Image (cartoon, grey):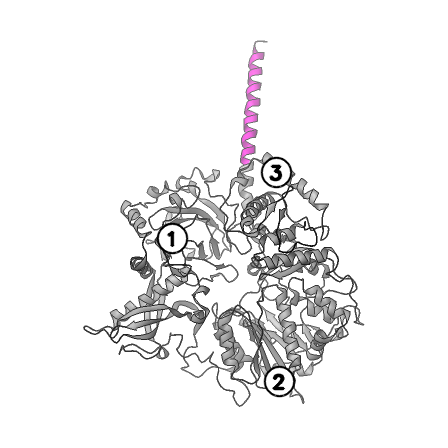
Amino acid sequence: MVAAPCVRRLARRSRSALIAALTVLLVQTLIVWNFSSLDSGDEHRDKRDRGSSNEDPRLQHHPPPAARSRGPAAATLHSQAPGGYFSHLPKEKMRTDSNNENSVPKDFENIDNSNFAPRTQRQKHQPELVKKPLSKQKEHLKRKLAVEAKGKEHSLLGKNSNEVLQYGDHGVKNSSHQKENHRLNKQHHHMKKTANSSPEIKYDLPPKCEITGKEAISALSRAKSKHCRQEIAEIYCQHKQGKLMPEKVPRFCPLEGKANNNVQWDEDSVEYIPAKPVRIVFVLVVHGRASRQLQRMFKAIYHKDHFYYIHCDKRSNYLHREVLQFAKKYPNVRVTPWRMSTIWGGASLLSTYLQSMTDLLEMKDWSWDFFINLSAADYPIRTNDQLVAFLSRYRDMNFLKSHGRDNARFIRKQGLDRLFLECDTHMWRLGDRKIPEGIAVDGGSDWFLLNRKFVEYVIFSQDDLVTRMKRFYTYTLLPAESFFHTVLENSPHCDTMVDNNLRITNWNRKLGCKCQYKHIVDWCGCSPNDFKPSDFHRFQQTARPTFFARKFEASVNQEIIGQLDYYLYGNYPSGTPGLRSYWENFYDEPDSIQSISDVMLTMFHSFARLGLRRAETSLHMNGDNSCRYYPMGHPVSVHLYFLADHFQGFLIKHHATNLAVSKLETLETWVMPKKVFKIANPQSDFGRLQFSEIGTEWDAKERIFRNFGGLVGPMDEPIGMQKWGKGPNVTVTMIWIDPINVIAATYDILIESSAEFTHYKPPLNLPLRPGVWTIRILHHWVPVAETKFLVTPLAFSNRQPIKKEEASKLHGGPPRNAYMEQSFQGLNPVLNIPINAAEVEQSRKNSALVGVKLENWLDSLVNSLWSAVDICATGPTSCPVMQSCSQTAWSSLSPDPKSDMGGIKADGRLR
């Protein structure tokens, strides 16, 4: 009996210990779940939430509990990354060849194409939702689900129109952002909240129905113009009232299912000369600024017996001017007198094709047999003679690539059962709709070859199939990928369909399906990759007829274009200049300086001044002012310059007054970025890192920065990229250091053994402090490498010289030097990164500079990371030793035979 109290005390202690152990276990489980979810869930969030963005709001910029015992590493942010930044992603098999050109992901069922919150200004990182206790999150979810359930009762566009927002952590985050976005948009869109929190939009003309569908409401809240909002409301109401979409469409095809026409390709068929060869009209739908690539492609497909109709995007004025110039040289080339702003997935592309077909059929002097659409990113892989021989044999066929057999899945992933509207150069999703009864909907690639009979049927027929399908596809995502397929398969011409568009496309869905078009389309889509030299063997396959390939970009890789060109037409003569060079216009004076940013305008002016200093120091002779200049006006033009597929810098054409004769001359300066990536010395035993770079506009598909040269200003959001060799899994630490040694961010990246590239955009508070920034890369806190980048101070604001008050706001760094919510100041002594009071004071003084003093500071910064390689004169010059630009190998005015447009040769070709 004496031992009983001891036993009871022991039991109580055991229960207390057990409860404590269970509590610790629960806390550990929650911590592990919290961080493991960053891996397991982020692949889908990468596709759903960010689209082409490089930031995941779930990443915590706080010391993770698991790292608190690691000394300096306690302040790191953990993000993982194979080809992105996350480590435990499922591997996807690389497709080496696919001709299924659907522009939506193969794994469509895993993509959330539903949630499109209102777009506003850049959102600050908001971690409080992740910090919420689970019980509060559950209560929050219950309230949201209750509102959602009530909304379902009032669905207008179909049973799923109000089932837009998906809940869970992802839904909670987005619903919070929607509240904030709606509040911000109130100023711009005159929105007000009703009792049930549904935003109400004010219109010039009130809508003819009550708008309650979430997708339509979201579109209204994000649309920029009153006209677009009015159109969204009108189309929504027409659809609600059943006045928009056809319910039934007649089928005129006598066949059951698709036609099964098997066409053969014979490499020797070119020897067969048809008695009446077909004549082709090539419709080139082009955009951008790559005029030299377009001209090179045009030379490769040109023949005097065919016709060329060119449409330049309404926003591509430079390219339109260039096309008008070379079109004058050839009687069988015309440019559309109208222009549209076509967008990826937009209804405008189908409108462009239909209007082009109408124009071509009305041209009585152009007698053509086939319609072929091409872009500047295409290139032939067979000669014109081979193409003509093949099409002459199959002159009654129509060549389109279909999606496959699972029609229901195609309809879902293509969004054909959703209502879309294009306005404000955006495709807005407005809700659900039904596929018309009576027909088989088909689709696949929007690149095709159609014979004249079918084109005439599409343009001139007034039967219900054509007229109702035109109506249906006016409000369809990616309509050009389905309209011609569906009309052909259900028309009297259905027996002429060949399931082959005679193209080969470089699909790499692992890289190309990053939802990169969500800023212009309320959907998740894919695009093909550029071909590289390693792909050349694919053009020589003969398993099926192929005559064109896509995509090619000379700014990404020109070598593969050269290989194809030589394969088709032979080598250029020995000594031909410019074969390894490529120039692409970036800015042209007629487009006005409003077409470029303040950052670019600031840098281009500084580049021009660097060129004038080079002329003065390298060409000037004592007592002679003939090679001294004073800068005048804005730049005339800017080109990107590449040599052997490596970016070589900018070519700035600019005016300057020669001080010896006081005459205006036009010069061109070549500026090249200096090498800023350095491996640590002595080298660490870690050897996987090959290169690191900082920039903006990261293209995850091609794994390059589209902002060539990395021009970054105080209000930009830079991205850190690293290239890796193969090796064991390893974790490295990234440290971002501003010009006065304030540690702006630090985070860890787990590099898998198979990772080739990693990239991450830390959510830094803006403005960034101007000056030279340093990025250090550490492994086990041992230096591996470092790189630098320039945040340029702005000499212009809204393309006007910056004022002192504006400069002070933009050049002073973030408030309280806080780039993130937490401070990394404790790492400065550990990493031996001292903050010097004198440098801090000088930075403060620099932030208020304007005028000449600002230019001097700017030029000293630019000169530390850029060098003026050479300068030349575009015309007459008073500097006796100044070379002529046309005599250089680098100038935009130097010879470029591969892209120059010459006269028609005896064989009817240009190349």
Query: Considering depth in this image, is 620 or 890 the residue closer to the camera?
Result: 620
Dot 3: element: helix
Identified at 66% across, 65% down, the residue is 479
Question: Quick check: is 652 in the magenta stretch?
Answer: no
Question: Quick check: is 7 in the magenta stretch?
Answer: yes
**CA distance separating discs 2 and 1:** 67 Å
- Lower sequence index among marks 3 and 1: 3
**CA distance separating discs 3 and 2:** 70 Å
Image quarter of residue 219: bottom right
Q: Decide: marks 2, 1 in contact (CB < 8 A)?
A: no
Taking 454 as reference, is 771 above or below it? above
- The residue type indicated by label 3 comes to His
Q: Which residue is mark 2?
A: 270
Taking 730 as reference, is 563 above or below it? below
Highlighted range, magenta = 1-28
- Lower sequence index among marks 3 and 2: 3
Tell which residue pokes out farthest to the top in this image.
1
Q: Which residue is mark 1?
A: 806
Residue 444 appears in the figure: no
Q: Which residue is mark 3?
A: 140
- The residue type indicated by label 2 comes to Val
Query: Considering depth in this image, is 604 or 255 the residue closer to the camera?
Result: 604
Q: Quadrant of the N terminus?
A: top right
- Pinpoint residue 700: horizontal percent, then vertical percent: 51, 59
Pair 2/1: label in front:
1
